[in-house]
Amino acid sequence: MSTLSKRALPAAVAAGAAYPLFLVLQGAAARPTAFLRNVVEGVSLGGVYALIALGYTMVYGVLGLINFAHSDVFMIGAYVGIFTAASFGLVATSTHGASPAVAVVVLVAAMAACAALGMLIERLAYRPVRNAPKLTPLVTAIGVSMLLQNIAILVFTATPRGFPPVVRATPVALGPITVTNVKLLDLGAALLLMVALTVLVQKTRVGRAMRALSANMEAARLMGVPTNRIIAVTFGLGSALAGAGGVLFGIDQPAITPLTGVQPGLKAFVAAVLGGIGNIPGAMLGGLLIGLVEQLSSAYLSSSFAPAIVFTILVVVLLVRPQGLLGRVTREKV
């Protein structure tokens, strides 16, 4: 890219963002209370995107693989949540919410099922092609994604299913604004899980092994790190977070279908790239930002074009800062 192009690109991006930003600021000034509520709801949605994005970024950090089946693991987590809640007598038409203990069981069941599914996918689909040319694992990931979608259609049918009221929605006053307790629960649970993951990665032996594989897999293997086991654990942890995201997303949505994971999965992938693919704090930051941008775009621009705006951000980031907000530029020796 020429020097002139490098200088012109930021100016063009700034000019393109000026009008949407003006509309958002105009709306915020006209109705500040509604703006604050949209911010809270956007960050809450972003917490769910961050949970999904962490799975993408963890697998990429260790294997350099974009696991396109991850969004469908998220969808399976939502279905596991539905059937676990049903085992406690909760259905979509229930008028009462579950007890806190039941809600925790639903969340943990979805996380455990998705962790097992993620590890199974890694063992059967990705491990045999780990040393193949890079295109082979990519095509395999797409194939696994389509397989999971069609299995879900076969098992659960394509009919939308309402998510049981695991948490009964009630309004909560936060100073001048009012939001539902579901939004706050989504955000709180997402932040708690992100903190737990950070502690695990930074403070435990498993986390150190994961970071060693991310830095240099061959050197880590020679130093005695059980490569296959740690990779399987990485898939399990990322898939467990996706399962939690499926439950948190489901309790705030009118219905779940076998294609529910497609749009959230793509937006979470954008979040991972925005923060810096392979960077765990970057995935968290990217998810929160994407959720906020989507909510504000829907409120002040157009709900129909909100997804397009999110993907436009991906294009801009790849042009202006390909390594992402918190990513680092790396040089490969050839």
Image: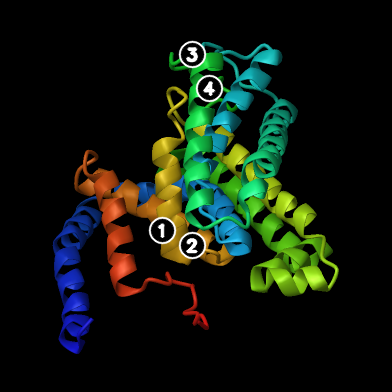
Q: Number of marks in the image? A: 4
Q: What amino acid is labelled 4 in the image?
A: Ala
Quarter of the image where one finds residue 179: top left
Label 1 belongs to which residue? 289
Label 2 belongs to which residue? 285
| Residue at mark 2 to residue at mark 1: CA–CA distance | 6 Å
- In the rendered image, the residue lying farthest to the bottom is 3
Task: Check disc 1: other Cα within 10 Å, few if <14, some if 14-19, many if 20+.
Answer: many
| Badge nearest the viewer, 4 or 1 | 4
Task: Check disc 2: other Cα within 10 Å, few if <14, some if 14-19, many if 20+.
Answer: many
CB within 8 Å, label 4 to label 1: no
Q: x and y percent of residue 267 in the render?
A: 40, 48
| Residue at mark 2 to residue at mark 4: CA–CA distance | 31 Å
CB within 8 Å, label 2 to label 1: yes
Label 4 belongs to which residue? 152
Q: Secondary structure beneath disc 2? A: helix
| Residue at mark 4 to residue at mark 1: CA–CA distance | 30 Å
Please tell me which of labels 2 and 3 falls first in the chain: 3
Label 3 belongs to which residue? 157
